[in-house]
Every structure is written in C-alpha cells, then in structure tokens.
Image (cartoon, coloured by chain):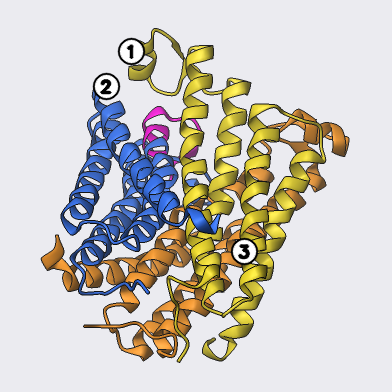
Chain colours: A blue, B orange, C yellow
Amino acid sequence: MASISLSDPAVRSYLVYSGVLSLKVLAMAFLTAKQRYKKKVFANEEDAKSAKGVVKLNDPDVERVRRAHLNDLENIPAFWILGALYVTTSPSPWLATTLFRVFTASRIVHTIVYAVKPLPQPARALAFMFPMGIMWYMGVTVIMHYASAL
Amino acid sequence: MASISLSDPAVRSYLVYSGVLSLKVLAMAFLTAKQRYKKKVFANEEDAKSAKGVVKLNDPDVERVRRAHLNDLENIPAFWILGALYVTTSPSPWLATTLFRVFTASRIVHTIVYAVKPLPQPARALAFMFPMGIMWYMGVTVIMHYASAL
Amino acid sequence: MASISLSDPAVRSYLVYSGVLSLKVLAMAFLTAKQRYKKKVFANEEDAKSAKGVVKLNDPDVERVRRAHLNDLENIPAFWILGALYVTTSPSPWLATTLFRVFTASRIVHTIVYAVKPLPQPARALAFMFPMGIMWYMGVTVIMHYASAL
C-alpha cells in the first residue's frame, strides 16, 4: 500500500505552492477593485452609489483584469487537484518541486504581463503554455498510474 | 511525522462545511435558471427555442445572479484547497471550526444580499471581506508552516 | 478511526476520473483558441496584433465555447471536492466507481453537444442534470455522514 506523508518533500512543496497560488488568485479581487475605484466604474447600482461612480460593464482596463482573473480560475484549481493526484504517484521530489515552482512563477508572470504591465505577445502565451504543459504532464502521469481503475 | 485523521474535529468540520459550500455553489445554477425562465431570456438559440423565450445576454436580473455565481467561483474553490492545507497544520479545533462556520455563513449571506434580496452597500462588502480575511489567515498560516519547502 | 487507502478501488477510481476531468477542462482553452484563430477574433489588442485579427468580444461561436468552459468551472471543481469528501464516507466501490464514470462521461457529452456539435435541447439539459444529480447525492451523503460536526 502506497501512502502519503506530510514529511515527504514533494508533498510539502505541493502544500506551500498551493497556498501561494491560492493567495495569488484571491489577490485578483483587489486588482479588480483597484481598477474599479480608479476608473469609478462598477458592475452594480449599489456599488456605484456607495462609491459615487457609474455602472459600466465594458471598461477596457477593468475587463482586462477580469480576464486575467478568469484565466486563473481556468487553470489554478486544475493545478490544485492535479498536483494533489500527482504527489500520490510517488514522483521524484526534485522533479515535483521543480514543476510546482515553475508553475507558480509562470502563473504570477502571466498576471503581470496580462493585467499589471501588459506586454506584446508572445509574453503571455509563454507564461500560459509552461503551466499548461506541466498540468498535462501531471495529468497523463496520474491517468497512466491509475489506468487499471478506468 | 504529522498525520491527518478523519476523527479529528477540525478535519470533520472541514469535510462537512466543504460539502455545504459545494451544494451552495451548485444551487446557483438553479437560481440562474429561475431568473431565465421568469424573464424568458436565454444564452443559446436552442434554449430559447425549447422554452419559447428569446436570446438576450444582458438582462440585468440574470446578470446579477451570474455575477454572484462567478464571485463564488472566485472564492469557494480557494477555500476548499486552503481549508484542506490549513487542517494539515494542526490548528486548534475550536479555531478551525469557528473559521469554517463564519466562512460558510458569510458566503451564504453574500449570495442573499447580492442576488436574492439585493441590499445597499456595505452589506455585500462585509459578507465578502470576512471570508476573504479568513482565507488570507489560513493561507499565511500554511505558507509559514511549510516555508522551508519554498 | 476511518482511513483512506490508495489501494481502495473507490479512491483509485476517484483519482483517475479526476485526472481525466482535469485534462478535459484544460482542453477547453484549446477549443476556444481554435475558434478564435478560425474567426480571427481576439479579446486583447496584443493578441489581435500578433495573429493579424481583430478585437471582438461578442463572436457567437467563440462565446459558445466560452460558455461551455464556464459551465465546466461551475461544475467540475465541485466534483473534485465532493468526490474526495465522498470517498472518505466508505461508499460501496461499485457505486462510487459508477457515479464517477457517469459523471465523467456526461460532462464530456455536455461539451460535445454544447460547443463541438450543438444539438437541440434537451440534449445539453440531460448531460447537465446527470452530473448535477450525482453531485447532490454525494453532497447529501457527506453532510449526513459528518452532520455531528456541523
């Protein structure tokens, strides 16, 4: 019987980088709020009223941050589950840790080049494809490891 | 070696409140559907046809429920992972249980004041900030606990 | 004390189908990209520039794929957590495996009838309701199992 231990370096690495990525996703709410207050545009009547702004749903600066946020939701929860499944397959701690680090750093860069300081392509495409490739590697590893349960 | 036990009160509390929050998120689909059928507005041709309604993507009542749903997706999956990471740090069962209860109650209040019975601010802002603060507390606790794995 | 074992068939089934569903969600990004390049419509100036296309946020074919993607985000992360909670309640391996298989197959069908080869209702409604019903069954089972921790 395989087992998962909180003293396994791959597990500890998963735990800390999942924590960092969680706070990174949550921080997007503040990045959106910052743009909303700067531009005085809000999505709801009651928000516009309390902040003396207007309701506007297509401000380009706000929408850019919201797209970056949605892109996080499309990718980071998939990492949380795939990373957890992957550490149950007894990966090399060095490889697992490296994948988690590259994933986390790339997703932070993705937000910066998308919503903080927009850069020409392929900056964002690269910051998107590294984490995506890591998740496919982890997913295929998990499916092959447990293929007999399909 | 630390271990996680299904008889630990903090773990059991995490399990039951994560279950409640899951059903709470899923219920948003029915809240959206209720508004769509009431207003007869749908996002797809095939839906409008089968329900004898029209395609309309900017109905304010439907969009309000959809924003509440998206706000759940921005926050509740982050709780699922952060809560799971947090219970591995051997928190006080009393504190953990209290945080999970306040989080769950606040997120339910958030939906009510956003999409069921809209209230003036700061009702929704408060219902948003309590769970957000709880998640940052859990995230910082996790990162400090496993900081050596960074 | 209950325990969770990686040799439990229900757990192994959860692990492999969660992996399959992760890659299924991630594949939606490529389905969106395929539509964007086919229609030459992008959400960002820098993307339109690098692909010699235009910025357009309401292309019906792109938006259809994006709605299918968002619907995945509303449902599949809830499965990841509910499935994990559910296997801690010592379900029958046969029942658990069957639920995970029907869930996964239905969500794949959902995407096909929504965004690959759109079909009249109730095709998509059925592919939505089976997984939804499975998640409510798992959620109620979890809450009843751990009700004393509420």
Do the residues under discs 1 and 2 have CB atoms within 8 angstroms?
A: yes
Q: Quadrant of residue C119?
A: top right
Tell me the quarter of the image containing the N terminus of chain C: bottom left
Three-letter code, disc 3: Thr
Q: Which residue is mark 1?
A: C50
Seen from the viewer's position, the closer of residues C58 and C142 is C142
Residue A95, horizontal then vertical, whole percent: 19, 51
Report which residue position mark 2 lands on. A122
- Residue closer to the observer: A140 or C126: A140
In the rendered image, residue A142, in percent from the top left (x then y), is placed at: 40, 53
Instruction: Determine whether, in the image, residue C142 is placed left or right of residue C134.
Output: left
Q: Chain of mark 1?
A: C
Residue at position x 55%, y 39% from top? C69
Q: Find the distance from the CA under tag 3 to the CA under tag 2.
A: 42 Å
Write down the residue under mark 3.
C97
- Establish whether labels 3 and 2 are both on one chain: no
Please check whether the numbered discs 1 and 2 fall on a single chain.
no
Three-letter code for the amino acid on which mark 2 is drawn: Pro
Gap between marks 1 and 2 measured at Cα: 8 Å
- What percent of the width, then of the height, locates residue B128? 44, 63
Name the residue at 49% across, 64% down.
Answer: C12
Which amino acid, mark 1?
Ser
Q: Is residue C38 above or below residue B119?
A: above
| Element marked by disc 1 | helix
Instruction: Find the magenta span and give its range.
Output: A52-66
